[in-house]
Amino acid sequence: MILGLDISTSITGYTILDYEGQILACDHIDLRKEKNFFKKIRIINGRLEDISERYEIEQVYIEQSLQSFRSGFSSAQTLSLLSKINGIVSWLCYNMFGKDPNYLAATSARKACGIKIPKGQKAKAVTLQFVVDSVPGFDVQYTKHGNPKAGYNDRSDSYVIAKAGWLNERQEAQNTG
């Protein structure tokens, strides 16, 4: 089974896929109310322990954290915090599942899944719509204003990371088999 993670300082999405690429679990961990860094990590660790007890994870794929600044996006402080969380969660996964995590850039994962982001459109919105349209049973809850509720973009991003990882595993199996 494959665990895909979209790690964030506020909401972390995760998806578990079976050997056929079907979703076994897809959810998010809401960290917005917790301000203490170490408590955020404790919350993520608790969910990873639950996953470890319920599923036999064979590969972990994590969205590669942002490496540089882009106008209108995360600040230096946020990028630093994200890198710390990403590193610690990577260690937790290695320690818990006994596998080196694999890292995928969001753009590479979307490309592997056949998602094209038209110029001027937001990647998260296009990705969510692609997942809603192409993955049976992937349901989204919306606010009264028609926006996806918090966590659903993170779920869809984690699905894309997991699916790209699953496709990668299949490709490697074909190349070696």
Image (spheres, rainbow, N blue to C red):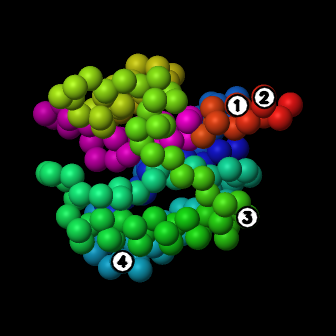
Q: Is residue 35 left or right of residue 99?
A: left
Using residue 43 as the reference point, say whether residue 116 is left or right of it: left
Tell me the distance, in whole angstroms, between the alpha carbons under discs 2 and 4.
Answer: 42 Å
Tell me the kind of residue under disc 4. Answer: Phe
What is the three-letter code of the residue carrying label 3? Gly
Residue that label 1 marks: 171
For the residue labelled by badge 1, is the local secondary structure a helix, a strand or a loop? helix
Q: CA distance from mark 1 to mark 3?
A: 22 Å
Eye-nearest disc, 1 or 3: 1
The mark that comes first in sequence, 3 or 2, is 3
User: Could you say which quadrant of the image residue 23 lies in?
Assistant: top right
Q: Residues within 10 Å of mark 1 (few under 14, many from 20)?
A: few
Image position, residue 161 (x, y; %) = 51, 42
Give yes or no for contact between labels 2 and 1 (Cβ–Cβ under 8 Å): yes
Spatial separation of the CA atoms under disc 3 and disc 2: 24 Å
Residue position marked by numbered label 4 in the rendering: 37
Magenta-drawn segment: 142-164
- Residue 139 relative to residue 165: left or right: left
Q: Are marks 3 and 4 in contact (CB under 8 Å)?
A: no
CB-based contact (under 8 Å), mark 1 and mark 3: no
Q: Residue at x 55, y 65 (%)?
A: 90
Q: Please name the residue shown 60% across and 40% down the image.
A: 165
